[in-house]
Image (cartoon, rainbow, N blue to C red):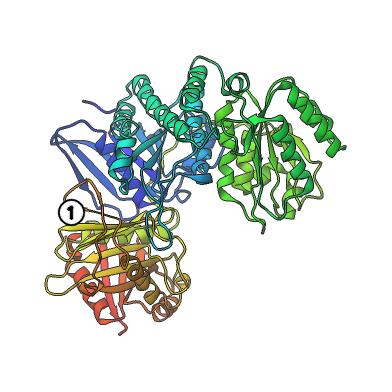
Amino acid sequence: MRLTYNQLHVHGDNIVECERALLMIVDALPFETIAIEFQGDSITCPSYLIYCDGRHTLAVTFYPGFGRWDHDILASLQERGGVLREAADVIVTGVEDGYEHPIFAVEFCGALPAGNQAWQRSGRAYSFGAVKIPYFYISELGGYELDGQRRRKAARMPNPAVPFSYLSFSLERDTPVFPIFVTSPGADETSRATFLSEFADTEVSEMIFALLHGKDIKEISKKLQRKVLSFVMKRGDAGRGSETLSGAQWEQAFNSIDQGGNITSFLLNHVKQSWSKTAYIDALTDNAKNLMALGSELGVGLTSTKLPMCLLDREKRQEFLRHVQAIYPNLSHEFIGWMSRSQPLAICWVMGFKPRGDDARPDRGLPPLTRMLIGSDHDMLTVVYGPAPVSTWAALESNPRDLANRNGLWEAILETTDALLIESATDSVTRKGFVGEHWHRNLPTSTPSAFFVTPRPTRFSENDVDTAIHLLLSRVMNDEFFEGMCNPPGGDWSGVSLLTPDHQLELRWLSLPRVSGADTKRPDHVFQIISATKADIILSIESKETPQTLEQGIGPRLTRYIENLVRSPASIERQLTAKGWAHSDREFNLSEYRFASAGAFLATERAKIIDAVNRSETDLVFSVGFSHSGERCKMEIFVCSEIGNEIAGMIERNSSASSNYEFVVTSVV
């Protein structure tokens, strides 16, 4: 069975996302026996050989960390028409005749996809679908939030409009852009049973297999469509009152779009929901309140009575314009002319900015969500009412393209909307109404160019520190090291695993506190070091790019974070060799373990390294250097305590396992 490509590149946010993609690829290969061999030929760009039924079939190379290679893959996507600088967690490309060809992209979501977080990544789906690159949003279902005492709260789910937007967008673009629902490790039997028919682990493997083989994907796309639609319908029927469409109405909306219609016409003709918008910011102006009241009076909900999106039919659009002209008598002729168009109007309401002027990051997904729902041929107005920094408005007037290039929120707004209306407490300079010609005028044309990314970073970063630590302790070392967490830049802190003293059970704590206390610090790595003669060591590591950024006294704070976490019962557990998880209330006995801490950073001037070692109050410190190519790693381990010396000794004993690592141990005890 021949693959289209025998060499794949996985471009990812970090080493963990790259490894997740590798496992997805392996799961998609329908062979009786599959072996993965870590090559160890490069530390910064690790590679693997996949042997299927005893034959070498596929070579896979990782590129952890976007924007630091001799070619920017995201720039290539923009050349192809990807309008937003949104990177997925991973982009998988196939190599043929010395060039790379994008095959698919994946976003991994271990967090609960509820509230405005549910649409935070909509811009990524929009951008990849725009260039016809299949995009899969892996979303875990059935998990639970935890309260301040780490007790389970009710399960949270996304508004059905969000997964439905993927369906409507994928139909319009004729490209698979789907949320893929998989079972959350923290799901109980009830939630597993509830969403059994929506889980799509098998189907996404079939899709990836088809993409790797260049096979027709129409049938598997239909399977995934039905999975997503089934989830949307269940969420619609489970909704509170009439805040969203019923399951039957969602199905009718899908059928309308599938038959060449659009959701705007369907809603205006068949489901006219009331709509209201309430904003909870002190900086809300009277004019903004009046605009929202107008939207509530004249508009209907764009699939929901509460989401910040509404629809106006042709007549209500003209009435809305008359009121807007009364509020803003100096609107441009271009804006008035556009608003006078005789077709329905979708309005997206974007606060966009917090009271201090910094971006409300989830809002950058709201305009793409709206556009994905209504399609590319329908008019869309975005109302921005948050207190953006004063400098924003002059930039919007004079150079909107530069504003978009500097700010991801404005890029998402300008690339997806047809017209803008500004009503902000900080705006005293704009003409309030803008149409797309203002920011699309004189845009340079770009021609897609062939590319190949050399597996050698142009600069080293914290990503390389994390990759070197991860590969050393989870791949090169023997079974003395169990990896409980790896959270490089872009990670999600989805959980920490530890083994029971007899090493038979894996306990896992989910929904880690994202905000550390004053006396604690969430680590970037957690390893359990197995000792044959003493209690196991739980090692927490903080990684940084430079020694200067390693915080003073970080060691005790790292240890306290883990100690505090495991004082609560584990969330889930499983046999070490098993795949499935079960809920757990098992207590963790701290007295049966020893705790240690470490810092890690890129090697630099000796004085700065020694200063960081002395300030950190850790048990050991890893100073990580690389050869020019990034293939080899020289690691100096500074030992600061007796337990640190024990850990360094275990690493040294296993150092011959890889020729790519060179170790120097320096005692500062």
* Towards the viewer: 644 or 102: 644
Residues 510 and 651: in front is: 510
Furthest-top residue in view?
259
- Decide: is 567 above or below 225: below
Outermost residue toward the right in this view:
329
Q: Residue at x 26, y 55 (%)?
A: 584
Q: Amino acid at mark 1?
A: Leu
Residue placed at 56% from the left, 41% from the top? 365
Q: Name the quadrant of the N terminus.
A: top left
Q: Secondary structure at mark 1?
A: loop
Q: Is residue 471 left or right of residue 13?
A: left
Residue under pointer 1: 576
Taking 63 as reference, is 651 above or below it? below
Q: Quadrant of the C terminus?
A: bottom left
Residue 134 appearing in the image? no
Q: Does any portion of residue 214 appear in the rendered image? A: yes
In percent of the image, x 44 and y 37: which residue is there?
451
Q: Is residue 319 above or below residue 48?
A: above
- Image quadrant assignment for residue 536: bottom left
